[in-house]
Amino acid sequence: PLALAGTSFAGSYTSGVRERLHWARLLRGRAIARGGVSAVAVAAVVVSVDALFGLGPTRLWTRIGAGLLGFLIPLAGGPPLVAVLFLLVPQLVGDGLATVSQINGITLRQLVTPARLLGRVNGTTHVLLEGIAPIGAIAGALVAEAFGIRVAVTVAVVGSFGGLLFLLRSPILTMRAGEAPASDEGWGGTDPG
């Protein structure tokens, strides 16, 4: 659900900033680049955050935080300062939170997958995530065409919460950094066979 919503969001976001706010290309690029800055900054502290709060809870709450901040984007408008803040806060803070969540997702996948299967699991994950991207982009375009860009961005943000249902019922919520879920003995990067 997150990959599908993400590609839907990406196209709608750029179009929305251009059409609704009439921002020049350079200003749009600068706003979007702020997300990259925060992503690099949080990547340096993710291990400390995981040690403090736990791998599973950090993954869940950073996904929730990034998603909630995404709701500011379709609300951007009005005076230029307000519009800028409604776009920059999700870029600066939300992209950082999303980066922590993605790092933890990969870490979790490596912890619970036997070493002999890591390449296959990571490869399959990437094929699935990249393979669904065109579907998300087309869905976002159809929603934007029928209902407008703000609605398309809002639908994409709501869609980003779809994968959280699996996390809420998962044993990873009790995981600390560097440990496999208690119910999955024999996993954790070692080959049980």
Image: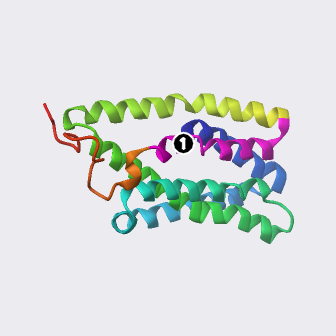
Q: Residue at x 70, y 48 (%)?
A: 13
User: Relative to residue 191, is residue 103 depicted above or below?
Assistant: below
Q: Residue at x 55, y 29 (%)?
A: 132
- Which residue is outermost to the right? 78
Give the position of the N terminus as an image quadrant.
top right
| 166 part of magenta stretch | yes
Residue 84 image position (x, y, % from top left) = 74, 66
Closer to the camera in the image, 55 or 103:
55
- The answer to which image quadrant residue 8 occupies is top right
Closer to the camera in the image, 117 or 19:
117
- The answer to which image quadrant residue 57 occupies is bottom left
State whether residue 140 appears in this view: yes
| 12 part of magenta stretch | no
The kind of residue tagged 1 is Leu
* Crowd band around label 1 with a 10 angstrom C-alpha radius: few (<14), some (14–19), many (20+): few
Closer to the camera in the image, 24 or 91:
91
Display coloring: rainbow
Which residues are drawn in magenta? 147-169
Residue 155 image position (x, y, % from top left) = 72, 42
Q: Secondary structure at mark 1?
A: helix
- Which residue is outermost to the bottom? 81
Q: Residue at x 51, y 58 (%)?
A: 61
Q: Residue at x 51, y 61 (%)?
A: 96
Residue 104 image position (x, y, % from top left) = 39, 52
Secondary structure mostly seen in the magenta stretch: helix
User: Relative to residue 140, is residue 64 depicted above or below?
Assistant: below
Closer to the camera in the image, 58 or 152:
58
Give the position of the C terminus as an image quadrant.
top left
The residue beneath circle 1 is 165
Residue 25 image position (x, y, % from top left) = 71, 54
Position of residue 43 in the picture relative to residue 72 (left or right): left
